[in-house]
Image (cartoon, rainbow, N blue to C red):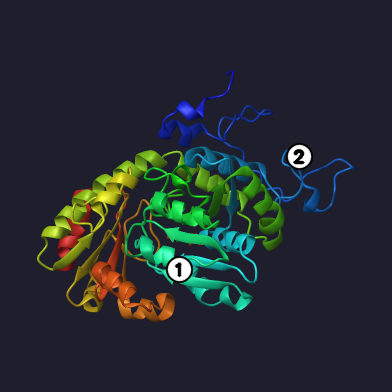
Amino acid sequence: MSGKIEFSKAGEQTKAIHAGEFPDPVTRASSPNLVMSTTFVTDADSGFSAENMKEDDTWMYTRWGNPTIHQLEEKLAVMEEAEMGVAFDSGMGAISALLFHLLKSGDHAVVTDVAYAALSELTNEVIPGLGISITKVDTSDLNAIEEAIQPNTRLVYIETPCNPLLRLTDITAVAAIAHSAGAKLVVDSTFATPMATKPLTLGADFVIHSLTKYLGGHGDALGGIVLGKKEDLFSLRKKTAIRLGGILSPFNAWLILRGLATFPIRMRAHQENALKIAAYLEKHPRIKRVIYPGLPSHPQYELARRQMKNFSGMLTFQVVNGREMAQKLAEKLQIIHYAVSLGHHRSLIFYMDSKNLQQTSFHLSTSGQLDSWNRFAGEGIFRLSVGLEDADDLIADLEQALL
Ligand SMILES: *Cc1c(COP(=O)(O)O)cnc(C)c1O
């Protein structure tokens, strides 16, 4: 073997397999080493505080950096066209470290009104308690974002497609609004994945992924990552990640690396299955509405086609009397698991009751926000994460349970 692969010219599958990895120089092992050591033997002149850490320092302590985690960070940076990534113990670990890194008392942030529930709850309670003000807006409405901007706005935070509505936000347009106000744009791209959208190439400053979902892909390891420019991310690692300490386990990094090898192939298969199931559900007499970005009936289909190269396996549907149907599906489904989470090889379904979620997580306040919610979710939705089983088997499972 000689020389390095030129990843800027390589395809997605080659990047997913080879980026960040290298044969072990001592053993010549071809697959990545799992290094479970917490500490590394150093020179007597090494500093004790991460404050003096340099980018090319040798390994010191796994909370500062670890060779297995490093390979994962490098691979994902190539896949997202980022200069650097810092991995965390979960998606929420990544999100909270980034928010603590970017915001201080007196600052203001504009945050999507519908998002992953724990992010919504964190920005409803904990963050405002630190003297940071938050305005929640429907980020599919560009005027609403512009109106929410204040002189001290440091950050605009979006999720596209957002969990659980699958409502989209135009990244290029929001980046322009954020930057003209001197604010940074953060995109949680967990639902889109780098197969669909590379937000940094559209103007975002930071991308977040829950690696627990499509990137790991097998439902066996929690993880998260923040990606962006080197100067921002090196500072995030040094000032925030190391001190808050929500660092990924090298074992989980290794599992996620293994999952990533098939990521592009999996995403194509998720999309193929989801399209078949969405088409089946759209014709089903018990189904009121199906939302899937790959269907012409999605309210933002034009934006979906422009911004997404893959529509993934996430879809939602509404039925009459959702609560009752949830009971029935939890009892009768044989292949599809009635469970939270998403992006696994296994299909997962979960019912989200609108009233319930509004109270616990979203607190929507304006009529525009409520109208948008009702347009996408009505009284409640089933969120279906279409897995990699045979589509005919999934359809047969739904058919016998929906009766
Ligand atoms: C799951 C999820 C998260 C949180 O990730 P964890 O790994 O569960 O902490 C954040 N954002 C989105 C969009 C998610 O779906």
Task: Name the image quarter holding residue 167.
Answer: bottom left
User: Can you tell which quarter of the image residue 272 is in?
Assistant: top left
Q: Is residue 330 visible?
A: no
Question: Is the N terminus in the top left, top right, bottom left or bottom right quadrant?
Answer: top right
Q: Indicate the position of residue 274 as horizontal and vertical percent values.
A: 25, 51
Total tally of numbered discs in the picture: 2
Residue at point 83% right, 42% down? 42
Q: Which residue is mark 1?
A: 148
Seen at 23% across and 75% down, the residue is 322
Q: Nearer the viewer, residue 199 or 286?
A: 199
Look at the image and tell me in which quarter the C terminus lies. bottom left
Viewer-closest of 159 and 324: 159
Classify 259 as above or below 366. Answer: above
Q: On the image, numbered disc 2 is attached to which residue?
A: 58
Residue 77 visible to the viewer: yes
Q: Eyeballing the image, is 66 above or below 133?
A: above
Local SS, label 1: helix
The residue drawn where x is 71% and y is 60% is: 243
Q: For the residue marked with disc 2, what is the amino acid?
A: Thr
Q: Are marks 2 and 1 in contact (CB under 8 Å)?
A: no
